[in-house]
Image: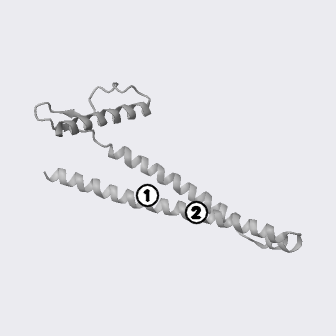
């Protein structure tokens, strides 16, 4: 039964490597090093690919900056869609002005909801970046102490 599980694991790893290579646009066997090395004598996995920490931090930084720019644009849109004196005059003077006021308020409410959603995503990403940096620092310290 354990050989069946090991075979299934190896098959899943090969499928995963092939799908990642297909997404990247390179053939599955294009890498010079195998994705997973298995010691044939003991059957243990001896080599797994390392995570590029700096690349991952750079991607997280890019995501954070794009979320910040999106937050700024949404904040500006929320300020622009806020009900003001002009909208109040239109509401009073124009027939059907209450419908206009309702549409302005809905537009402002939607902009504020989107802004709150982006703010939550930005806060979560910032917390995750902090946790990731502290975890990688801890790992580097532990490796240096060994």
Q: Residue 19's quadrant in the figure?
A: top left
Does 104 sit left or right of 134 as displayed?
A: right
Where residue 14 appears, x then y in whole percent? 31, 32
- 96 in relation to 40, above or below: below
Q: CA distance from mark 2 to mark 1?
A: 15 Å
Farthest left residue in view? 41
20 relative to 115, above or below: above
Residue 79 placement (x, y as % from top left) = 67, 66
Residue found 54% across the figure and 60% down from its top:
118
In this rendering, the count of numbered labels is: 2
Mark 1 Cα-neighbour bin, 10 Å: few <14, some 14–19, many ≥20: some
Quadrant location of the N terminus?
A: top left
Q: Which mark is residue 111?
A: none
- Corner quadrant of residue 37: top left
Residue at numbered disc 1: 125
Q: Which residue occupies 41% across, 47% down?
A: 58
When asked about the image quadrant of residue 18, the answer is top left
x, y (%) of residue 63? 47, 51
Residue beneath the point at 10% across and 31% down: 41
76 relative position to 10: left or right: right
Q: Pointer 2 and pointer 1: residues touching (CB < 8 Å)?
A: no
Coordinates of residue 114 in the picture (x, y in percent): 59, 61
Lateral position of residue 146 relative to residue 12, left or right: left
Q: Secondary structure at mark 1?
A: helix
User: Which residue is nearer to you in this view: 93 or 135?
Assistant: 93
Front residue of 131 and 28: 28
- According to the picture, the residue beneath numbered tag 2 turns out to be 115
Which comes sooner in the sequence, label 2 or label 1? 2
Horizontal side of residue 144 vs 114, given as left or right: left
């Amino acid at each position: 039964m354990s050989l069946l599980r090991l075979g299934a694991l190896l098959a899943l790893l090969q499928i995963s490597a092939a799908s990642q290579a297909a997404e990247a646009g390179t053939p599955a066997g294009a890498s010079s090093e195998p994705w997973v090395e298995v010691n044939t004598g003991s059957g243990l996995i001896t080599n797994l690919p390392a995570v590029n920490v700096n690349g991952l931090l750079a991607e997280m930084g890019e995501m954070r900056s794009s979320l910040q720019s999106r937050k700024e644009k949404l904040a500006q849109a929320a300020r622009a869609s806020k009900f003001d004196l002009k909208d109040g005059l239109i509401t009073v003077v124009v027939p059907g002005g209450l419908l206009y006021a309702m549409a302005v308020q809905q537009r402002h409410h939607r902009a504020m909801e989107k802004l709150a959603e982006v703010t939550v995503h930005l806060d979560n990403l910032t917390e995750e970046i902090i946790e990731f940096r502290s975890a990688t620092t801890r790992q580097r310290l532990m490796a240096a102490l060994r």
